């Protein structure tokens, strides 16, 4: 069956077609000229002709669908090179995420790529042309899937509890199982008791126990072999140490060693059928789901420790975007936890790559992390492996002891969510000796980590972008230590922006109210060319608390993600430094000032209710109790 241009446009959506030539094609030289950008054409390796005009171009928001038609696309490497050139042009022209399609006009065959036209980006399941919204969904994920995964995560936690898996072991155990399942672990092994004819009940019980032990050992050894193979395959220098940690702390722990084989298989089957099925390395939607699972699960098992602040996936993505992570940036998280920021940064950088070689460089040389806690370090390693590697440069230890590692990394972007109540014994004495805090905790509430990294960047003589999640108390700066730290930071670095984030952003983990501070490192705050600091009152992200699920993404009546709409608004306000009543402000500030939007924005009092007033009073009362100014009865 023949297919023409009209058929393709009808299938994807006429309202999204963007052309700039009389023939309906899209000329990139013309578009670059209008955008006042330099156009460097790619030449065909086969004929030497310039790659300039794309057959059909669709755009919706920040997603572009590029379609190149050929009579026969089977084995046409020249057509692949041509389409890849258009993907490169599109990214440089618009910065959009791209779906690239080769479509045959002699039959219905197509090849669909997420991003650059590479074998690793080929979406094998995409065999028919679809409406534009479905291509957009490849990048934005399905809301119902997210909620389903959150419900399944809650159920998984209950299953682990029923089998006696302790909370401190659950995250790493589940992560290890998920990684093995992703690598096609065979776990459906029968428990063969053997011949029980003539045996006593006691003898049969012994046979069952031994059979269970054999199957349990077979499963654990199979997982160990998969982990060992993955780490060695990646040329991991610390493969033995990482394998030892994962095996000793997880697979060889007493509770897993002694777990009934049927219970072990039940857990694996549940993860396989209810979590793994949502993972797709070639889809940002799949990455979103996996990050959501890790974050949500860690919150459940860490809920007893209210100091654990697991960063929501949509916030890590937003921070990765505003810091400009791409294939050329070196990213560091010096307190990486389970690796949420590193995973997000790697996904963003890989999206920007145009060849397999560039992807390998990103995984090998562009992602750096440090984690102090041994168990969480193992979880970060597992998390990165599940997401397609990038774990080589994750070190175990304190960032204060790994100064040379940080200097060698020479980061361009630092993303972090440092501990808010770090113990003074874990910090260098030169930092904590003057602190008067009698509790033995870091009185800067995490700012000491920011200052430490900023100082290293200063020593390197370079500029970098740093985004950190910190408690609101850091922005208020009521203590002497916080005020001093704020002033010290501004001597050599610029406070670019501060976003006040939603209440209970870490729910159901830590209860801290948080803000995101963004610094331009290597440029003094008082530099006259600096614009005023942007402040965003970003308290509503389109998520709502739901029992047993945490904070859940909401949708509009027509099914659109409220977060996606909110994210676009936040980015527009920040990038263009726009002041909107009740949402944002721009202000020149010093280290002695408050670093919160609430202090500078204009309030639309017509929208205030009595409930808002009562909530403010409640929040203030909670703050006074927490800080010890008044005491609970």
Image: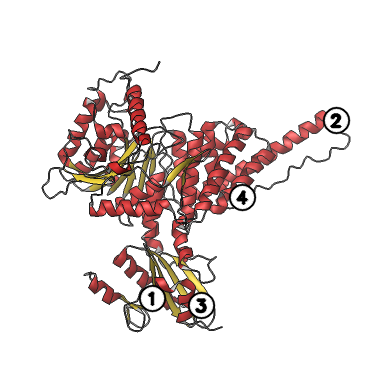
Q: In the rendered structure, which disc, 2 or 3, sits on the residue that comes first in sequence?
A: 3
Q: Quadrant of the N terminus?
A: bottom right
- The label nearer to you, 2 versus 3, is 3
Q: In the rendered structure, which disc, 4 or 1, sits on the residue that comes first in sequence?
A: 1
Say which residue appears at 40% left-offset and 39% top-offset.
Answer: 505
**Image position, residue 414 (x, y; %):** 30, 45
Mark identifier at residue 74: 3
Task: Tell me the crowding category of disc 4: few under 14, some 14 to 19, or many 20 or more residues within 10 angstroms, Cα based.
Answer: few
- The label nearer to you, 2 versus 4, is 4
Out of 610 and 475, give the one closest to the viewer.
Answer: 610
- In the picture of the structure, the residue carrying the numbered disc 1 is 82
Q: In the rendered structure, which disc, 2 or 4, sits on the residue that comes first in sequence?
A: 2
**Image position, residue 478 (x, y; %):** 24, 27
Out of 388 and 279, give the one closest to the viewer.
Answer: 279
Identify the element where label 1 is drawn. Answer: helix
- In the picture of the structure, the residue carrying the numbered disc 2 is 200
Left or right of 579? Residue 308 is right
Spatial CA distance of label 4 from label 1 is 39 Å
Spatial CA distance of label 2 from label 1 is 74 Å
């Amino acid at each position: 069956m023949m297919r023409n241009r009209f058929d393709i446009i009808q299938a994807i959506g006429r309202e999204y077609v963007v052309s700039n030539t009389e023939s309906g094609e899209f000329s990139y030289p013309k578009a670059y000229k209008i955008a006042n950008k330099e156009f460097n054409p790619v030449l065909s390796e086969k004929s030497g002709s310039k790659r300039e005009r794309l057959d059909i171009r669709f755009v919706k928001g920040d997603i572009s669908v590029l379609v190149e038609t050929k009579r026969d696309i089977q084995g046409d490497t020249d057509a692949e090179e041509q389409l890849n050139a258009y993907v490169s042009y599109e990214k440089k022209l618009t910065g959009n995420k791209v779906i690239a399609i080769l479509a045959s006009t002699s039959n219905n065959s197509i090849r669909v790529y997420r991003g650059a036209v590479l074998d690793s980006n080929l979406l094998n399941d995409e065999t028919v042309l679809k409406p534009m919204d479905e291509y957009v969904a490849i990048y934005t994920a399905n809301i119902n899937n997210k909620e389903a995964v959150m419900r399944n995560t809650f159920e998984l936690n209950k299953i682990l509890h029923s089998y006696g898996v302790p909370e401190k072991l659950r995250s790493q155990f589940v992560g290890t199982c998920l990684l093995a399942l992703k690598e096609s672990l065979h776990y459906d092994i029968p428990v063969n008791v053997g011949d029980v004819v003539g045996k006593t009940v006691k003898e049969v019980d012994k046979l069952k126990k031994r059979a269970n032990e054999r199957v349990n050992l077979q499963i654990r050894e199979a997982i160990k072999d998969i982990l060992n193979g993955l780490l060695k395959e990646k040329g991991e220098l610390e493969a033995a140490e990482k394998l030892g940690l994962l095996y000793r702390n997880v697979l060889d722990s007493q509770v897993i060693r002694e777990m009934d084989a049927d219970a072990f298989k039940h857990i694996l089957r549940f993860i396989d059928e209810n979590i793994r099925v949502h993972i797709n390395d070639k889809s940002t939607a799949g990455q979103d789901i996996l990050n959501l699972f890790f974050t949500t699960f860690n919150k459940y098992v860490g809920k007893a420790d209210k100091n654990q602040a697991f960063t929501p996936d949509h916030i890590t993505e937003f921070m990765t975007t505003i810091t400009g992570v791409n294939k050329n940036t070196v990213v560091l998280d010096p307190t990486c936890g389970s690796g949420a920021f590193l995973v997000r940064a790697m996904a963003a950088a890989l999206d920007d790559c145009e060849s397999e070689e560039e992807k390998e460089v990103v995984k090998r040389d562009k992602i750096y992390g440090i984690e102090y806690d041994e168990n969480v370090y193992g979880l970060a390693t597992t998390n990165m492996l599940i997401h397609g590697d990038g774990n080589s440069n994750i070190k175990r230890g304190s960032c204060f002891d790994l100064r040379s590692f940080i200097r060698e990394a020479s980061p361009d972007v630092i993303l972090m969510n440092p501990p808010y109540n770090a113990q003074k014994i874990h910090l260098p004495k030169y930092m904590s000796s003057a602190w008067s805090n009698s509790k033995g905790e870091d009185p800067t509430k995490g700012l000491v980590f920011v200052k430490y990294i900023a100082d290293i960047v200063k020593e390197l003589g370079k500029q970098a972008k740093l985004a950190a999640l910190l408690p609101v108390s850091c922005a208020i700066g009521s203590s002497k230590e916080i005020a001093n730290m704020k002033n010290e930071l501004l001597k050599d670095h610029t406070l670019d922006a501060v976003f006040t984030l939603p209440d209970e952003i870490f729910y159901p983990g830590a209860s801290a109210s948080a803000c995101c501070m963004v610094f331009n490192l290597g440029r003094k705050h008082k530099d006259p060319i600096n614009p005023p600091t942007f402040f965003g009152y970003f308290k509503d992200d389109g998520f709502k608390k739901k029992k047993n699920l945490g904070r859940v993404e909401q949708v509009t009546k027509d099914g659109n993600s409220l977060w996606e709409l909110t994210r676009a608004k936040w980015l527009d306000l920040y990038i263009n430094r726009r002041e909107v009543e009740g949402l944002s402000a721009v202000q020149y500030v010093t280290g002695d000032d408050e670093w919160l939007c609430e202090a500078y924005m204009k309030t639309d009092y017509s929208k205030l209710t009595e409930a808002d007033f009562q909530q403010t009073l409640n929040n203030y009362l909670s703050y006074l109790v927490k800080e010890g100014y008044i005491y609970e009865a």
